[in-house]
Image: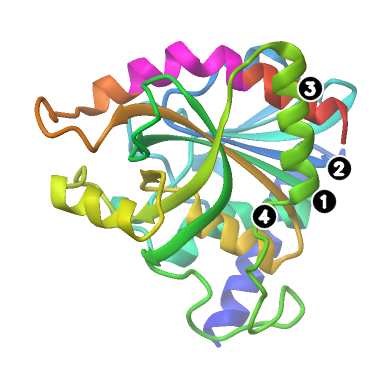
Amino acid sequence: MEQKRIIQQLHEATAFIRKQYNHEPSVGIVLGSGIGNLVKEISVEKEIEYKDIPHFPVSTVSGHEGKLIFGILRKRRVVVMSGRFHYYEGYTAQQVVFPIRVLKFLGIKTLLISNAAGGMNPSFRVGDLMIIRDHIGLFTVNPLIGPNDDKIGPRFPDMSEPYNRDLIQKAKLIANRSGIPVKEGIYAGVTGPTFETRSEYKLLHIVGGDAVGMSTVQEVIAAVHMGLDVFAMSIITDIGIREEDNIITHEEVLREAKNAEPKLTAIFKDLIDEL
């Protein structure tokens, strides 16, 4: 019964959006904390506030604007989530991924995700870009828990390659020819909203994490469940493995994300151009 209710809500949200915007986007983009200037590169055709969309969550975090933006970027129709949702805001995991499912219902084939993350790899520096090669999602809640509808995706989706290899390779080539240094690594997803303790940073690094954040993993699981091609990139906004002066604030995260954003935007634009 619960699954039928969610399906109905997805159809209602999608129908509302289609009445406002009748074109089909091929690419969805999720903008993370403080990463909003990509919108300036888009020839905007329509903006819809989250609060106006039936059953849509509403952003409650600073640095997340809270609207869907439709338009053209590099000759492709895109839809941008300017602001995302997090489990720590009090939403269920299913609510967090509801907008990703709506984007799929609207017609997207590819999902590009950005986020701000804390670095745990000793070679990382604040301002680095990290292409996410894989993730560790055991420290957050899986959004597929509960009844499954086979019309949306399989009961047991394979997660051996959640991030599309071809897209990763294209992004690396784009970065290289543009002279933009990029790292590549594993993203560890946690619930937040607390920044990690020093011991937690160490643990997450020991189990394989290069960067850690409070988003993305649930979105990617839902996207893979529905058969979308996914590419994701983190801006390293702080270094969590420091033994001293390890005080991290949200304001610091937003500032460093804003400083590094032009490089991420350049890669996303060229990647869309090559899809």
Q: Nearer the viewer, mark 3 or mark 2?
A: 3
Q: Locate residue 43 relative to residue 238 in the image: left or right.
A: right
Query: Can you see residue 13?
Result: no
Image x and y of residue 75, in percent? 90, 22
Q: CA distance from mark 3 to mark 2?
A: 21 Å
Q: Residue furthest front?
A: 123
Among the two numbered marks 3 and 2 on one chain, the one whose residue lies closer to the N terminus: 2
Mark number, residue 107: 1
Left-right relation of 5 to 186:
right
Please determine whether, in this image, residue 183 is positioned above or below residue 19.
Answer: above
Mark pair 1, 3: CA separation: 21 Å
Instruction: Return the residue at label 4.
Output: 102
Q: Amino acid at mark 1?
A: Gly
Q: Amino acid at mark 2?
A: Glu
Quadrant hosting residue 255: top left
* Residue 198, percent from left and from top: 15, 45
Label 4 and label 1: CA atoms lie apart by: 9 Å
Q: What number is the disc on residue 194?
A: none
Evaluate if marks 2 and 1 touch, with contact meaning CB atoms under 8 Å apart: yes
Query: Image point 40% across, 51% down: which residue?
Result: 209
**Mark found first going from the N terminus, 2 or 4:** 2
Considering the whole magenta stretch, tell me its main secondary structure: helix
- The stretch in magenta equals 254-264
The quadrant of the picture occupied by the N terminus is: bottom right
Specify the quadrant that holds the C terminus: top right
User: Answer yes or no: do the residues labelled 3 and 2 have beta carbons within 8 Å?
Assistant: no
Residue at the spot of label 3: 270
Above or below 214: residue 245: above
Q: CA distance from mark 4 to mark 3?
A: 25 Å
Q: Nearer the viewer, mark 1 or mark 3?
A: 3
Where disc 2 sits, the SS reads loop
